[in-house]
Amino acid sequence: MPAMASHTAYLTFDTDERRQFVRITDDVRRAVEESGVREGMVLVSAMHITAGVWVNDDEPGILADTLEWLDKLAPPSWKEPANGVARELSPDPGDFRHHRGGEDNGDAHLKNLLVHHQVVLPITEGRLDLGPWQAVFYCEFDGGRSKRLVIKVLGE
Amino acid sequence: MPAMASHTAYLTFDTDERRQFVRITDDVRRAVEESGVREGMVLVSAMHITAGVWVNDDEPGILADTLEWLDKLAPPSWKEPANGVARELSPDPGDFRHHRGGEDNGDAHLKNLLVHHQVVLPITEGRLDLGPWQAVFYCEFDGGRSKRLVIKVLGE
Amino acid sequence: MPAMASHTAYLTFDTDERRQFVRITDDVRRAVEESGVREGMVLVSAMHITAGVWVNDDEPGILADTLEWLDKLAPPSWKEPANGVARELSPDPGDFRHHRGGEDNGDAHLKNLLVHHQVVLPITEGRLDLGPWQAVFYCEFDGGRSKRLVIKVLGE
């Protein structure tokens, strides 16, 4: 009978940029190896409400396209809207209601909704079972301070 | 050798509002405690196609900002579009094709896509391993009738 | 003491259409049955960065509404934008930066972000524990070639 196993690892980020994609595929792979799990799942989850985790291609053009597009869909209020659509997708009261408490990261909460804060990845024969182009990214939307992410491996 | 354990709980919602965020962090926590699981994961999943589950800050400004923004991105056809962008993001045939069957909740299906119907959360040392600001919300987009959500705990 | 079990299955798609929703609920159900798992979770995950997995209603109107709407939010550059909003949500450099390498599927990466590449579904008493209207779809956004998806069952 196979034994159940679990393993937990935490990563900490302190990005230079306010918004930044950080590739963490190797960190997830290392946690899977340390766990000894042969068959199972690994949860990769930002512990913040202004960050996300995305699985996509590690191609600089895609990442730049994505950030430009996210700033149109969920426009920051600390810079001029990119165009008329971004202006109309900005909050109607003129600024985010959330900013009444002194914050300025309302857009980062909406980007968190679009990107999502977590993914679950399969483990097969002791390895992260990703497609050839799938890389794992931590997506910082309100950086410049210390943020955490948890990796939880579960399986046999 | 640690024993595997699982636990299942169901929640039922019947919201007053058509669209409403309902905080369920404590319900998820309770299910984790009842499971006896020390290390593992918990799946929190709406059983409907017009609802979602979101992890974010329990701050009323954010929730109001988010609902306004979701109504621009995925505009209901039972009320006037919020502005020109919402009008252009409405379906081209004038109304949702889905409404030909008598429904009026086409926008709720698109909000389900944006928010997603489920999250998976980590359990560490017997506790829900969330960041300090992470709260779990059931997101109702077509309320006024009974809806269900399943919580599934798995671990050791 | 319940024994842990896992099971893995792969599906391959080669859609006729560039964009297509393929219902896979029965394939997931079959993998769950083959696993013998009574209580647990099943991960359903596209192995590509231009595809997604969505749980929603198998109603043709919804699927047509959704595809039209996704083409406004994440507009392809290989066809005329649907309207002014789609034009403004297109990349500012005139075309996706990603296309400088010869690709033409930049929009499919953004649709992957909106829809997400994976879902996790609950298993209760040996059955996929879905609501009455929840169907599972593989969402192809850049078809016409062979694509894979992995189903990973974990539980007891």
Image: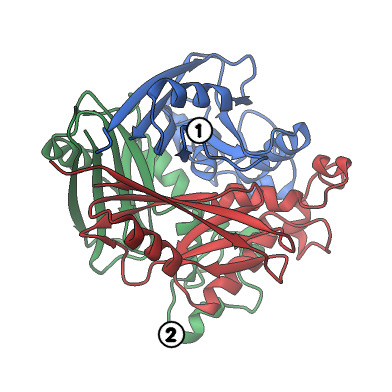
Chain colours: A green, B red, C blue
Within the image, what quadrant is residue C5 found in? top left
State whether discs 2 and 1 lie on one chain: no
Category of crowding for the residue at label 2, using alpha-carbon neighbours closer than 10 angstroms: few (below 14), some (14–19), many (at least 20):
few
Image location of residue C137, percent across then percent down: 58, 30
| Label placed on residue C49 | none
- Give the structural element (helix, strand or loop) at label 1: strand
Chain at tag 1: C
Within the image, what quadrant is residue C72 found in? top right
Which residue has dot 2 on it? A102
Q: Using the rendered image of the protein, determine whether residue C36 is visible from the camera's viewpoint.
A: yes
The reply to whether discs 2 and 1 touch (Cβ–Cβ < 8 Å) is no
Taking A67 as reference, is C139 above or below it?
A: above
- Give the structural element (helix, strand or loop) at label 2: loop
Q: Quadrant of the N terminus of chain A?
A: top left
The residue positioned 42% from the left and 34% from the top of the image is: C42
Taking B45 as reference, is B13 above or below it?
A: below
Image location of residue C64, percent across then percent down: 74, 34
Name the foreground residue: C123 vs A45.
C123
Name the foreground residue: A109 vs B41.
B41
Taking A37 as reference, is A9 above or below it?
A: below
Estimate the spatial distance between the alpha carbons at disc 2 and disc 1, rounded to whole Å.
49 Å
Which residue has dot 1 on it? C127
